[in-house]
Amino acid sequence: MVFVLNPKVREEKIERFIHEWEQKGFSTILSVGTEHTADCLIGNTAAVDLDHVVQTNDIVAYGKRITEQYKAVNRTVHEDDTIVHVGNISIGEGFFTVISGPCSVESEEQILKIARSVKASGAKALRGGVFKPRSSPYAFQGKQAEGLEMLRMAKRETGLPIVSEIMNQTQIDLFEDVDIVQVGARNMQNFDLLKEVGKLKKPVLLKRGLANTIDELLMSAEYIVSAGNSQVILCERGIRTFETMTRNTFDLSAVVLLKQKTHLPVIADPSHASGIRSLVPPLAKAALAVGADGIMVETHNDPAQALSDGAQSLDLEQFSGLMDELRIRAAIEKKEM
């Protein structure tokens, strides 16, 4: 249930209104937008007389029930698009932000070379996996804490914010200097982890699980936001279907629906969506065309020798060419890159 408040209501009246509901056992989320301020009531609201609340509270303009289970991330509660700020970059409406880097951090030389190159090409943030969730226990598991130090070194060298995937809540302290904490597809419904990253004061990039619905993705985002962290970026990275010619099936309709259903920024990952290098550029351009707020692309200085996911990684020259094409299309879409 959401109550839209009258304009120019004094802060103490809003605080009193919220306190009264919390005394009754409800949780509340206050959403301040450019057009209006709304208070979302979370709990069993079936017995709440909506008309009575509106008629007896002079600060309430009107109220409405929210039928979806997700509340805090719902555009009904927060009409304005959320823009996530990371250093001097912005992710959200009006921007098309490109994040790039290798699937796995392999060495200091490798990550520095890639970081310098993707920055020169126009990437705004550097991704790099250090804790790798692999299907096989015998596959490369990442450089782990050593890899995080290599990422931090690349950040000091280039100034690029860094993005890396956390595997479980015991690693929280290790990610203190990571600018955007990624929750990967396999952990999308690791609810204990979602609660912990919800306590962080930094952006969280939440990937859709490979067999999860859009509703389930939004409910996972709800866990993070309801724990106190509103800086959530959603990522469509393809889902598992009966198709075998691609690694996953890129669900572009999910990008469009998410932009309609939630105020959170939505980016796409064409690398994992297809698993095929030649498909990454056209899918990246398609993501821009349907309204994504950015993309995350895997880039490697020598994809043939990559320790993981080389087949879907662009080389540095290919990435530079993609960025040139995206800039032309972004200008047409009137989006800043």
Image (tube, rainbow, N blue to C red):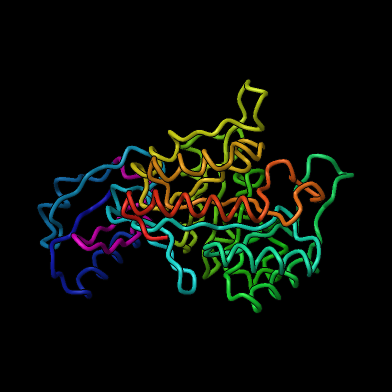
Q: Is residue 207 above or below residue 210?
A: below
Q: Nearer the viewer, residue 108 or 174?
A: 108
**Left or right of 303 on screen, residue 195:** left
33 falls in the magenta region? yes
Counting from the top left corner in percent of width and height, residue 17 is at: 24, 64
**Left or right of 273 on screen, residue 150:** right
Counting from the top left corner in percent of width and height, residue 157 is at: 66, 78
Residue drawn at the location 42% of the way across and 52% of the way down: 293
**Left or right of 327 on screen, residue 192:** right
Counting from the top left corner in percent of width and height, residue 314 is at: 65, 48
Residue drawn at the location 32% of the way across and 48% of the way down: 75
Counting from the top left corner in percent of width and height, residue 251 is at: 50, 33
97 falls in the magenta region? no
The quarter of the image holding the C terminus is bottom left
Residue stretch rendered in magenta on the structure: 24-46
Q: Nearer the viewer, residue 143 or 181?
A: 143
Tally of marks = 0
